[in-house]
Image (spheres, rainbow, N blue to C red):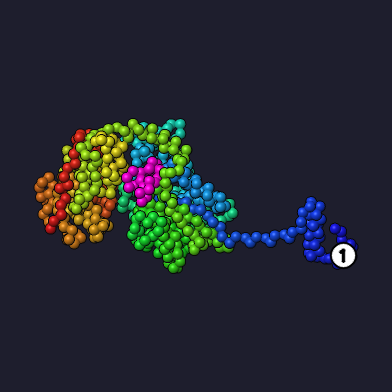
């Protein structure tokens, strides 16, 4: 096809160029035997970008699937690090197939209160496992402070402890060829500050920038109440500030950095009315509700934890707009998959089109090879400690289930062990009463046809607390007993926290008012009535000694002396009383 000079003159500008191009295309098409087609109109640019957000919380070092009720979701076996790693890989692959980027985060308590497999090595195996499965950022939970903030910093930066190759049944860096390198993910804690410098213990936030330039900011938030529920020495020199005020103050900071999509990783949570409704939000209550109401409307989602509950909520923020609030139960049994829908015009989260799904970590998938090998390695290293038989019991197990007075057979055993432990004796002063917090009893004492191993005992008491003996007057002990039903432990019955005891008996009245529930004249120590002005030597663990669990009366005690570990006292008692038979729960009674 040729154009004459007259035709060329008549055609001008862009139209002429377009026709020339079209004519050339027609020549080429005919030369190749093709047909002439019009160019397809340009596709409109997408208005939104989808980003996959995967979240866990309260893993607590459960490298292997937990046993009992902690090992399933509504009867479906769930959890285990090797299964979790596989599910995460599969979920990321599914997102990538849709062209979506992905980021993996956590909302605290990844370590601490861990099974022996992780705790025997200062939780180094758990940090290795989570780093290997692609975790990128995590808020600091209260249990991250179980071994103190110095040790928590080591979890981030790496290095080995000089712990005597197994001293106190723990062994840092047991594989000399592979020293502990620290977490590949970032610990975040915006509201924990050093008292002297007012600098944060960890970075307050991190910004994830994706290949297309999209930015999502993650603020890490630690439970403000942490100092009241961890050992005092573990947080000494730190101050914990309000979660809402801290997060809201960081919103303008992130916006100045070009971040409009903001997610809070909050180690605090709530309680749905139906705990089995893991993918919905029936009647949710608890601290997370108030925190959500107070957080800036510029915060787009809350990934929560701490309460070990599972929920998937859309709660209204202070601007009456829906905001995603989620939690993935505990022990790696669920993963929350969030599809963040980012408005490309504003780079902000489109909440209406942002959805979440709590997915069960089922055990019907192949185990991730690298994670499985890591677990197998530490199982071999821990075996000599774990499998040592320390005694026998005459029943299949000893339970922590309370009777009507809130006393339990296992609580009595632990209190007896603490009272009998010689490590708490100093200057010839032997304790005459013992007190144990029920929340520190983490499982029933199981056995293998009556044989009890150190590993089974450790499952009951995994905190490695020290025993502390001290002097308390009769008046102080009365105040202590009333604190079981008042303050943070009352006045509602659901909040009662009755200490497990040895060497002391008393009666309490459920119908009495808070502050006067212990029946007058009922308290006896060593079978003798308690005398207000008399000083008594008592023993407890260092967590309670510091006033933990809402028992400030312990902080008024004097002449404190630190003994050995509570787990060692427990193990020695079982060995010394082999075989052990549960004793009656007749130390605490209900009356008027």
Q: Is residue 36 left or right of residue 236?
A: right
Quadrant of image for the C terminus: bottom left
* Residue furthest left as drawn: 528
Is residue 71 in the magenta section?
Answer: yes
Task: Count every numbered label the image shows and give the total.
Answer: 1
Q: Is residue 465 left or right of residue 523?
A: right
- Residue 367 image position (x, y, % from top left): 45, 40
Q: Nearer the viewer, residue 589 or 281?
A: 281
Rendered image quadrant of residue 146: top left
Magenta segment, prevailing SS (helix, strand or loop): loop
The image shows residue 251, relative to residue 531, as above or below, that is below
Q: Residues within 10 Å of mark 1 (few under 14, many from 20)?
A: few
- Residue 304 image position (x, y, % from top left): 40, 55
- Residue 38 image position (x, y, % from top left): 73, 60
The image shows residue 531, relative to residue 177, as above or below, that is below
Circle 1 residue: 7
The structure residue drawn at horizontal position 46% and vertical position 41%, both measured from the top left corner, is 366
Asked whether the viewer can see residue 154, the reply is no
Quadrant of image for the N terminus: bottom right
The structure residue drawn at horizontal position 40% and vertical position 33%, both measured from the top left corner, is 174
The structure residue drawn at horizontal position 15% and vertical position 52%, both measured from the top left corner, is 589
Q: Which of 179 and 581 is in front in this view?
A: 581
The image shows residue 320, relative to residue 502, as above or below, that is below
* Residue furthest right as drawn: 5
Asked whether the viewer can see residue 400, the reply is yes
Is residue 590 in the magenta section?
Answer: no
Residue bounds of the magenta highlight: 60-80
- Residue 381 image position (x, y, % from top left): 38, 33
Label 1, secondary structure: give it. Answer: helix
The structure residue drawn at horizontal position 41% and vertical position 37%, both measured from the top left corner, is 375
């Amino acid at each position: 096809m040729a154009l004459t000079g007259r035709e060329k003159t008549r055609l001008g500008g862009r139209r002429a160029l377009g026709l020339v191009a079209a004519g050339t295309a027609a020549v080429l098409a005919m030369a190749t035997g093709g047909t002439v087609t019009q160019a397809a109109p340009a596709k409109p640019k997408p208005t939104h970008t989808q980003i996959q957000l995967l979240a866990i919380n309260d893993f607590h070092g459960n490298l292997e699937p937990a046993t009992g009720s902690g090992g399933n979701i509504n009867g479906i076996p769930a959890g285990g690090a090797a299964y979790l790693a596989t599910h995460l890989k599969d979920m990321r692959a599914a997102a990538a197939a849709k062209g979506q980027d992905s980021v993996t985060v956590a909302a605290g308590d990844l370590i601490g209160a861990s099974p022996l497999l992780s705790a025997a090595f200062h939780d180094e195996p758990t940090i290795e496992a989570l780093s290997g499965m692609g975790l990128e950022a995590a808020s600091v939970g209260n249990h991250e402070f179980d071994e103190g903030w110095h040790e928590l910093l080591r979890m981030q930066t790496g290095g080995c402890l000089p712990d005597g190759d197994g001293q106190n049944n723990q062994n840092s860096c047991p594989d000399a060829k592979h020293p502990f390198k620290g977490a590949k993910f970032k610990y975040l804690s915006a509201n924990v500050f050093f008292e002297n410098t007012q600098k944060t213990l960890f970075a307050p936030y991190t910004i994830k920038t994706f290949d297309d330039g999209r930015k999502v900011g993650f603020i890490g938030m630690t439970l403000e109440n942490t100092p009241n529920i961890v050992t005092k020495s573990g947080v000494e020199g730190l101050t914990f500030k309000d979660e809402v005020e801290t997060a809201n103050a960081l919103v303008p900071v992130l916006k100045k950095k070009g971040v409009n999509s903001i997610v809070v990783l909050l180690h605090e949570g709530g309680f749905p009315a139906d705990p089995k409704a893991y993918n919905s939000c029936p009647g949710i209550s608890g601290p997370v509700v108030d925190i959500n109401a107070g957080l800036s409307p510029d915060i787009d989602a809350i990934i929560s934890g701490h309460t070990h509950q599972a929920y998937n909520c859309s709660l209204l923020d202070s601007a009456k707009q829906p905001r995603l609030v989620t939690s993935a139960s505990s022990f790696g049994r669920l993963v929350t998959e969030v599809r963040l829908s980012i408005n490309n015009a504003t780079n902000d989260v489109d909440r209406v089109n942002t959805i979440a799904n709590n997915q069960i970590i089922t055990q019907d998938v192949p185990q991730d090879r690298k994670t499985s090998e890591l677990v197998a390695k530490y199982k071999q290293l821990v075996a000599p400690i774990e499998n040592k038989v320390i005694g026998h019991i005459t029943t299949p197990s000893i339970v922590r289930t309370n009777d009507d007075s809130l006393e339990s057979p296992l609580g009595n055993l632990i209190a007896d062990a603490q009272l009998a432990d010689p490590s708490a004796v100093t200057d010839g002063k032997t304790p005459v009463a013992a007190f144990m917090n029920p929340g520190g009893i983490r499982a029933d004492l199981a056995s293998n046809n009556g044989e009890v191993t150190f590993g089974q005992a450790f499952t009951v008491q995994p905190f490695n607390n020290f025993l502390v003996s001290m002097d308390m007057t009769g008046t102080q002990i009365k105040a202590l007993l009333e604190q079981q039903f008042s303050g943070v432990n009352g006045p509602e019955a659901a909040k009662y926290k009755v200490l497990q005891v040895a060497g002391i008996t008393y009666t309490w009245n459920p119908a009495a008012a808070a502050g006067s529930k212990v029946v007058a004249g009922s308290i006896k120590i060593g079978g003798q009535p308690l005398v207000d002005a008399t000083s008594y030597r008592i023993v407890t663990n260092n967590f309670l000694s510091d006033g933990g669990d809402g028992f400030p009366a312990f902080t008024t005690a004097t002449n404190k002396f630190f003994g050995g570990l509570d787990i060692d006292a427990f193990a020695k008692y079982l060995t010394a009383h082999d075989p052990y038979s549960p004793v009656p729960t007749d130390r605490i009674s209900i009356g008027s």
